[in-house]
Amino acid sequence: MVDVIFDVDTGHDDAIAIMTALTYPEKINILGITTVAGNQTVEKVTDNTLKLLDYLGCFIPVAAGLTRPIRYPLEVQPEAHGESGMDGPVLPPAKSRTLGIHAVEFLRKTLEESDRKVTVIALAPLTNLAFFIRMYPELISKIEKIEMMGGSLYAGNITEKAEFNIYHDPDAAKIVFESGIPIVMSGLEVCRKAAIPHDAMEQLKGKGKVSQLVYELLYFYCHYSRERGWDSSEIFDITPVFHILWPELFESKYYHIGIETESPAYRGMTAADFRGDRDRTKDRTEVLLDVNLEKYQERFFETIAKLEKMLKQDLSH
Ligand code: BDR
Ligand code: CA
């Protein structure tokens, strides 16, 4: 059983990642969820998180965090996630509320009180974590590892060179990558390999409360790929959760990753040191490179069916 804290900017794929973790309470114990500005403003992504949890009938502590990156202006992504940050499904207004303490304070309190090490699943710009590392360095050792979605070895998505989560707050990413905390990086390469076919998504339609929600989330989220005639889409943020649940599905390699914070053309680039003939003791980031696609896709649909069943059982009690 792994104790985890999610750090998210919910977000279609963040939402499905949270749902995936909720499906396996015997393997993943969610201590809380912190939110941060990224896909949309922190107010919107926090509201999306609360609405999702309410819809699923789950109580998990939520704490809202930083409202903008350390240095660069906030650049939200309505093209990818819509004006709400999670356009598509229309969920009832959230009834539950956040804890009313800042995300960074929630991280401090939770890690201080935990007698076991905690894994952070970071699916958003790394601003909350960077502040936490700078403010409470004595608690860094309580983090087992950071399982993150972000970065890429080769091409970017938001720019030619950078992936969105790292591009958005490269200063924060630099602090996190230089902190010494073990990092498992689900970058664009492995996420792209783990794409889910659109025709299989169609089969979720009308099947039940969970399947319909995932269908509506994906229908909006995949508009970009559909418009380009692609027949599958990556659901980026689920990959770190899949790696925790089923590490045997992945292949990885350790690299030293440098973060570019200055150059406009390369801002947010996660530069791996590929040289072979050098001191490899600095290779501390485990980069996921490949995945068993057939099994990954199987697990994806099994998970939705399992959560559907769990929810029905819960409701019938
Ligand atoms: C990342 O950016 C966000 O839009 C997604 O939620 C994911 O975390 C992909 O680049
Ligand atoms: Ca995200």
Image: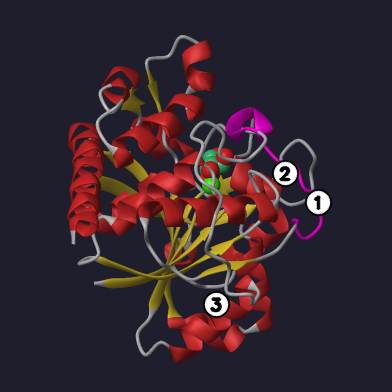
Looking at the rendered structure, the secondary structure element under dot 2 is loop
Quadrant of the image where one finds ligand 1:
top right
Range covered by the magenta-colored residues: 68-82
Colouring chosen for the image of the structure = secondary structure
Callout 1 amino acid: Tyr
Return the residue found at the far top.
229
Crowd rating for badge 1 (residues with CA inside 10 Å; few <14, some 14–19, many 20+):
few
Residue contact at pointers 2 and 3, CB within 8 angstroms:
no
Q: Which of the two marks, 2 or 3, is nearer to us in this view? A: 3
Look at the picture and state if 67 lies above or below 260. below
Q: Position of residue 145 (x, y in %)?
A: 42, 69
Q: Which of the two marks, 1 or 2, is nearer to us in this view? A: 1
Label located before the other in sequence (1 or 2): 1
> Would the CB of label 1 be found within 8 Å of ligand 1?
no
* Mark number displayed over residue 107: 3
Q: Position of residue 286 (x, y in %)?
A: 40, 56
**Residue under label 2:** 267
Return the residue found at the far front.
316
> Would the CB of label 2 be found within 8 Å of ligand 1?
no
Quarter holding the N terminus is bottom left
> Would the CB of label 3 be found within 8 Å of ligand 2?
no
Looking at the rendered structure, the secondary structure element under dot 1 is loop
* Residue 314 falls within the magenta-colored stretch: no
Q: Position of residue 116 (x, y in %)?
A: 35, 85
Residue 280 in which image quadrant:
bottom left
* Mark number displayed over residue 72: 1
Q: Main secondary structure of the magenta part?
A: loop
